[in-house]
Amino acid sequence: MNKNELKKLVGHKRHKYGAVRVTCKLGHQHPSKAEAMHCWALQAKINHGTIRDLEYEKPYDLIVNGKKVGVHKPDFTFKAPTFKLTSTGPMSAVSQINWDNPIICVDEVKGFRTKDWIFRSKMFQALYPEVEYRVVE
């Protein structure tokens, strides 16, 4: 059996960086095990009320001088609360979760940094400075 026959039988081709497509515990399809595990961890944060509005591969237009030069789709986009410190005594402080003005966060799960991804992530961070950009390795 040659490679092409094997590909037809299996139904997909092998990823060039060795990633294996995985279904997470929530039933979402992810291109890697690491991404599926991170999805599960973010879902736990939703259940605990520490993040909200989780979106998978939300597209962000990359517009320079009024022209669309590309699109960047971070793995996960969500809202995180800000924390308000309230003093209760001279040596102690208590933080309260504040959802009035949440922080927009994106998480990128990376096993291998390609030149294309490095360029798009830098452009994204320059165009969307209000978004907290985090890389999970």
Image (tube, rainbow, N blue to C red):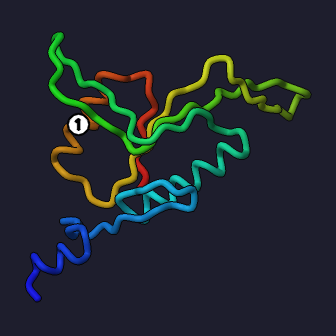
Figure check: 85 above or below 35 = above
Q: Nearer the viewer, residue 45 or 125?
A: 45
- Residue 136: x, y in percent? 43, 52
Q: Say which quarter of the image contains residue 70.
A: top left
Figure check: 10 above or below 45 = below
Q: In this view, does 66 lie to the left or right of 102?
A: left
Q: Quadrant of the N terminus?
A: bottom left
Q: In this view, does 126 lie to the left or right of 13?
A: right
Label tally: 1
Which residue is drawn at the image coordinates 34% and 32% (left, top)? 59
- Residue 58: x, y in percent? 39, 34
SS class, disc 1: helix
- Which residue is situated farthest in the top direction here? 66
Figure check: 83 above or below 9 = above
Which residue is drawn at the image coordinates 65% and 43% (left, top)? 46
- Residue 115: x, y in percent? 16, 48
Q: Say which quarter of the image contains residue 26.
A: bottom right
- Residue 111: x, y in percent? 32, 60
Residue pointed to by mark 1: 120
Q: Which of 1 and 42 is in front in this view?
A: 1
Q: Which of 10 and 124 is in front in this view?
A: 10
Which residue is drawn at the image coordinates 52% and 57% (left, top)? 27
Q: Which of 123 and 71 is in front in this view?
A: 71
Q: Which amino acid does label 1 sit on?
A: Arg
- Which residue is situated farthest in the bottom direction here? 1
Q: Tell me the crowding category of disc 1: few under 14, some 14 to 19, or many 20 or more residues within 10 angstroms, Cα based.
A: some
Q: Say which quarter of the image contains residue 60.
A: top left
Q: Is residue 26 left or right of residue 10?
A: right
Q: Quadrant of the C terminus?
A: bottom left
